[in-house]
Amino acid sequence: MKVLHVVGARPNFMKVAPVLSALRAHEHVAQMLVHTGQHYDANMSDVFFEQLGIPAPDVNLAVGSGSHTWQTAEIMMRLEPVLQEAKPDIVLVYGDVNSTAAAALVCAKLGVRLGHVEAGLRSFDRTMPEEINRLVTDQLAEVLFTPSEDGDSNLQREGIPAEKIFRVGNVMIDSLVKLLPVARAQRRDGLPERYALVTLHRPANVDDGAMLKSILQSLLEVSRDLGVVFPAHPRTRQRIAESGFELGGVAKQLQLLDPLPYVDFLALQARSQVVITDSGGIQEETTFLGVPCLTLRENTERPITVSMGTNVLVGRDPEKLRAELALVLAGKQKRGMIPPLWDGHAGERIAGIVAGEAVGSVLRATAGTTS
Ligand code: UD1
C-alpha cells in the first residue's frame, strides 16, 4: 500500500510527523512525502523538518508565495503529474492551508482517495481563507480524521456520512508531547523573567494598517507590566515595517524576534505567563500546556479550547485585551482541562485506520456506490 502525504506550510509539519512515524510500524505501507513549497524560508520549513524528525521530502514543488488563487492553482498544476506517476492508494492532507485544499482538488480530479487529518473544524467565517480550505477539503475527502466531537457534528451537519468520520484526537499534540521534555530542558538567555508571548499573522489583523497599529499600541501598553516576546511571521514583520510604527523605544521590554524553530517556540510557550495570538494551533497548544491564551479573533474553529481549555476570545477589542491581561497579572486567569484524546497517540490511531481494514472497507464501499 502506498500512502502519499502532502504538506506545505509551517502548521502542517507538526501534524504530519506523528503520522509518518506511526505508519512506519506498518510494514506493508510505503510512504512518500511531497512538500508544496508554500513555506520555503529555512526558519519556516527546514528547521521544523529537522526538529520533528521528518525525512527530506521525496518531491518539493517549490511553489513559493503569490495570491491565494495563484498559489492554489500552481500547486494543483505541479502536483498533478506527481500523483499520476506515483499512483498512491491514498493521499493524506493536513489542516487548512492552501496546500491542503489544492491537493484535495487534484485528488478529486484524478480519482485518488483522499484522507484529511484535522477534519471538521469550522469557524463559520468564510472571510477566512482557511475556512474555505476546510470546507472544500472535507467535502472531497473519503476518510476524515477529527480531533474532537465538534468536528464530527460539523461534518455530519454538512451531510458527510458517519462511516467516513474517525475521531482520533489531536495529532499536533502528539508532537508537543514528544518534544516538550526537550523544550523544557532548553536554556534561553536574555528573556524577561515574566513575559507575554505574542504571535500575529492573520490577514485580518496584519494587512489592515489601522488594525495592526491598534494591536501594536496594545502590546506597548502590555509591555509596561510584563515583558513581551514577539517572534514575528515574515509577512507580519513586513507589515510592521510598512506601517512605520515605532517599536524600538521599548526594545528591552518588547523583543521582536524572527520566527522560531518548533522546540524553541514550545519552550517559550511553556514558560510564558500568557500567550496573545491569532494562530489556530497555538490555541490548542496553550490549552494542553495550561497557559492562558488571549486570542485576537472574533471566532475560533477550535471551540473546545474555549469551552474546556484556557482560551479566551478577545476579538479586536483593546479594552477586552486589557481586562483579560489584568486578570492574568492578578493570578485570576482562566483555568482549563485537556480535552479527551489529546494524549500523544492520535498519529498511531490514524496510522492504524489508514493501514488497516477500516479504511479498506470504507473506501471499497465508497467506490462501490460511485461505480
Ligand atoms: C499560511 C496559512 C495559515 C497558517 C500560516 C502559518 C493559508 C491560506 N494560510 O499563512 O493558515 O496559519 O501559513 O504560518 O494557507 N513568506 C515568507 N517566507 C515563507 C513563507 C511565506 O517570507 O517561507 C511570506 C511571503 O511574503 C508570503 C507571506 O509570507 O507572501 C504569506 O505566506 P502564505 O503562505 O501565503 O500565507 P501565511 O500567511 O504564511
Image (cartoon, rainbow, N blue to C red):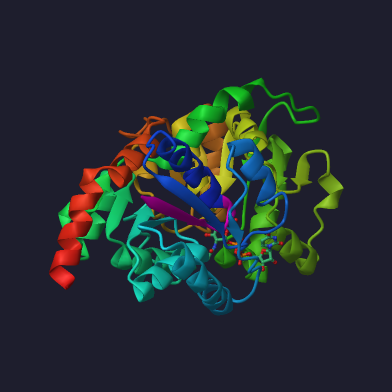
**For residue 238, above or below residue 326:** below
Magenta highlight range: 1-10
Q: Is residue 253 left or right of residue 371?
A: right
Image spot of residue 107 (x, y percent): 39, 68
SS assignment for the magenta stretch, majority? strand
* In front of the other: 339 or 246: 339
Query: In the image, what residue occupies the spot 66% across and 40% down?
Result: 50
In this rendering, the answer to whether 310 lies above or below 209 is above
Q: Position of residue 275 (x, y in %)?
A: 57, 40
Q: Is residue 303 visible?
A: yes
- For the view shown, which residue lies furthest in the right direction? 249
Q: Nearer the viewer, residue 261 or 28?
A: 28
For image coordinates 63% across by 70% down, the residue present is 208
Q: Nearer the viewer, residue 56 or 247?
A: 56
Q: Quadrant of ligand 1?
A: bottom right
Residue located at (62% from left, 44% from top): 49
Residue 2 magenta: yes
The residue under the point 31% across, 56% down is 120
* Residue 310 appears in the rendering: no
Query: Does the segment drawn in magenta span residue 21?
Result: no
Q: Position of residue 250 (x, y in %)?
A: 82, 45
Please tell me whether residue 224 is drawn above or below residue 159 in the rendered image: above
Query: Is residue 217 left or right of 170 when viewed as pictured?
Result: right
Q: In the rendered image, which quarter is residue 268 located in?
A: top right
Residue 31, given in percent of the width and then of the height, sits at 46, 48
